[in-house]
Image: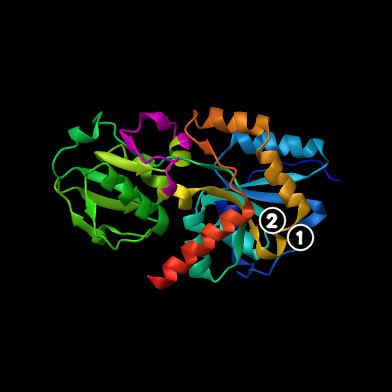
Amino acid sequence: MLSTKNRRYAATAVAALLATTALTACGGQGSEGAGGRIRIGISGSSSDWDVLAKKAKAEGLDVELVTFDDYSLPNKALAAGDIELNAFQHLAFLSQFNAANHTDIVPIGATAIAPLGLFSRKYKSVGELPDKAQVVIPNDPTNQGRALRVLEQAQLIRLKDDTGLQGTPEDINDNPKHLKITAVDAQQTPRALQDADGAVINNGVAGQAGIDPTTAIFQDDPKNASTRPYINVIAARAKDKDNATYRRIVELYHSPEVQKAAAEESKGAKVLSDLDPAALQAELDALAKAAKAG
């Protein structure tokens, strides 16, 4: 078995690779990559995955971490067979991607769920936000919908009763503070925070930008059942869902050493999830069914 390379690639390099590879859920090199490598797509630097790669190496598993800076790429790379697993998304995001791209990517294990927070550099509480405050939210469908729910739970807006998980600003029924809501790429929300009055920023993105997740002026509750669609998962192509080696990767992620690294990196903001693959798939199926019904 080759030694763990643990190399990281810029998203631009991976995008160039994808440009020459057809997007197909049944592409790739079989159950494992060239030379037995297990290439795992992640978003940004993650010390928990670095620890996992070292533990995998001790067991003779050649794990290579592939870093993406654009949320649109890791699933494309997985479906095309350019990586074997990815770990960057929650169930709601995966459901939307599968539907939009006719792919069959499935969750084989849970990692954690992180609260989604509203941050501000100008104000210390939700109540201080002024009339016509400029608030930035992520623009991808699932995170945008969740961000709007965060604003609703903070009693800043009220959404229409029939608003689903992928709500948009057009679904706002009441906006008493006349917030000016702008949707941008999730990775750009920390930068937008410099000029805006507030921004809803993904926990992982906040951490990568040096923003302490615990400084949010409001956040949703990761322990509430309503946030189950936002459990982050390790995903594989459907044909590989029972691959024993990949299942071992899931087990390694739940090891004490990896969990300690994850807790330190998130400053304790992430809540470990041990929902089993069957339950995760059931939730994913329910999300897909609800999307079709809507």
In the structure shown, which secondary structural element does the residue marked by tag 2 occupy? loop
Q: Is residue 170 above or below residue 274?
A: below
| Near-viewer residue (272 or 49) | 272
Q: Residue at x 63, y 67 (%)?
A: 20
Q: In this view, does 171 lie above or below 149?
A: below
Q: Are marks 1 and 2 in contact (CB under 8 Å)?
A: yes
Q: Residue at x 22, y 49 (%)?
A: 157
- The answer to whether residue 286 is visible is yes
| Near-viewer residue (264 or 136) | 264
The residue identified by callout 2 is 84
Q: Quadrant of the C terminus?
A: bottom left
Q: Residues within 10 Å of mark 1 (few under 14, many from 20)?
A: some
The x and y percentages for residue 183 are 32, 53
The residue identified by callout 1 is 31
Q: In this view, does 171 lie to the left or right of 245?
A: left
The x and y percentages for residue 34 are 79, 56
Q: Which mark is residue 151?
A: none
The region drawn magenta spans 207-225
The x and y percentages for residue 158 are 22, 52
